[in-house]
Amino acid sequence: MQQHRTESPAETGAETHDTWLEREALAEAMIPLIGHLYRNNNVVTSIHGRSLINKSTMNILKAHRFARRITTEELRLEDTAPILAILADLDLGAAAIDVGRLRLAYDRVSTAGTGQSLEEFLRTELADIVGQGGADERTSTDVVLYGFGRIGRLVARLLIEKAGGGHGLRLRAVVVRRGSANDLTKRASLLRRDSVHGSFDGTIQVDEDTNTITANGTRIQVIYSDDPASIDYTAYGITDALVVDNTGRWRDEAGLSQHLKSTGVAKVLLTAPGKGALKNIVHGINHATIEDSDRIITAASCTTNAITPVLKAINDRYGVVHGHVETVHSFTNDQNLIDNFHRGDRRGRSAALNMVLTETGAATAVAKALPELAGKLTGSSIRVPTPDVSIAILNLTLEHATTKEEVNTYLREMSLHSGMRKQVDYIDSPEVVSTDFVGSRRAGIVDGLATIAEDTYLVLYIWYDNEFGYSCQVVRVMEEMAAVHPPTYPAADADAAVAATV
């Protein structure tokens, strides 16, 4: 009779640790390849939507582990490392390449028995950009941030992160009112340090003589002005700029049109819900309605961006008869720290001490991006003493019945394989709380364990980082307005074919 040897815990631990060290070494070897592709070829690499640019060894390992949510198995570094090595040798042109999805596509081809080698597959898949030597057909668009508050600084961080070879969106200036004699140093310090989102990932230098802040090589001109209509941006070498108004002082066409009177401005984006006939864009839902002729657009609100993609998914599949949206929202700068006069009802009471019942326009604003839900939703909000991350509770009556398991499976698939996967995320951990979602790049995250479904009655809980997640949506709208998206691989049709197999 054959005897089976049982390994001791020490032996098992040593083997596991050795395996971990091998995986660490592979991830470390990927970093220069990722950097080479980014700096020399304008190629942005990711794994199932998780960017690899400027990531640590540990973050690369975590991105591979995330693949379990796609295929139920962790993505092996032994499978992705060869792809990166071949990509680096192909001297590619500018592109956004999802290495994880490329690997799935190649596995599907291999299963079909085509006999293609990995290099042959990649040369075929990327034929349009092979040998292009970093060529980038995109034009660069100058960006001015008008206002440098919570959203303005986070958008700045994202633009600096995406600066790459200088193509696409180029952050050129911020416009603020001078607040003190050492205003520039204070602005730079607020960009460098953030109590919620942590330290800026990189280096920041201040030049008082030129009123500039240089962050990771991006030179940002600080312009002091209180009049959006009288700035000559061309004096700073800025032309045909996209002005992103983060102040919220003007929300209608008449007010925002003041920016267009300044020399060097081409278009305006408001980071708040707009009034009147202005287009309210929720990226992933109605961004295709943006036209070259649109000169003023709004990015709606953080809550509208969080709930609209999920509502669209539910309405497409089950039909929404009516519903109520209740948001439990972190306090904002609009509220008082301690009791004091405020024009709005209840908002004068201390934000740090109270839950404050207030109104929200998000429920009605959804209809601007998703007209089929017009008149079907009501909404209200409770402001709570947390600095960031909110949750929306959707109480919905559906046309067609569903179950908790069915609707959760559907929303999970939407978060992984649909055209809204940049907007919708899904989680089913029993231990998550609000701080776990600080820094999420998705517009909203469905908490599957909290879902309630009974016949045609459905309750969904959607977490969202009302600062950073929303800022990511703002940048996506900016990219649409400027038409600076690089070609994406795998192509949409190939990606859909991969999704059908997992």
Image: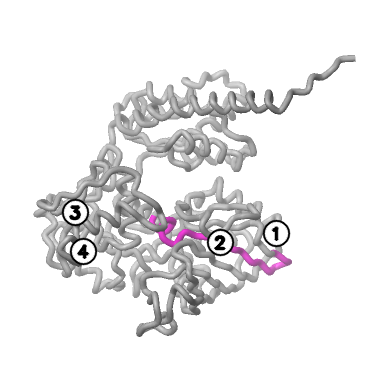
Residue drawn at point x = 54 percent, y = 26 percent: 21
Q: Secondary structure at mark 3?
A: loop
Q: Residues within 10 Å of mark 3 (few under 14, many from 20)?
A: some
Could you say which quadrant of the image residue 274 lies in?
Answer: bottom left
Would residue 211 appear left or right of 450 to someone viewing this image?
left
Q: Secondary structure at mark 4?
A: strand
Query: Start and end of the magenta stretch?
Result: 453-471
The residue tagged 3 is 240
Q: CA distance from mark 4 to mark 2?
A: 34 Å
Would residue 427 appear left or right of 135 to someone viewing this image?
right
Could you say which quadrant of the image residue 94 lies in?
Answer: top left
Q: Quick one: which residue is furthest to the top in this view? A: 1
Q: Earlier in the sequence, mark 1 or mark 3?
A: 3
Q: Is there any visible trace of residue 288 in the rendered image?
A: no
The residue tagged 4 is 176
Q: CA distance from mark 3 to mark 2?
A: 38 Å
- Foreground residue, 138 or 242? 242
Amino acid found under the numbered disc labelled 4: Val
The residue tagged 2 is 462
Asked whether 73 falls inside the magenta stretch, the response is: no
Q: CA distance from mark 1 to mark 2?
A: 15 Å
| Mark sitting on residue 170 | none
Q: CA distance from mark 4 to mark 1?
A: 49 Å
Which quarter of the figure is the C terminus placed in?
top right
The residue tagged 1 is 404
Q: Secondary structure at mark 1?
A: helix
Q: Position of residue 446 (x, y in %)?
A: 58, 57
Residue drawn at point x = 54 percent, y = 74 percent: 377
Q: Position of residue 68 (x, y in %)?
A: 61, 39
Q: Are marks 4 and 2 in contact (CB under 8 Å)?
A: no
Q: CA distance from mark 4 to mark 3?
A: 20 Å
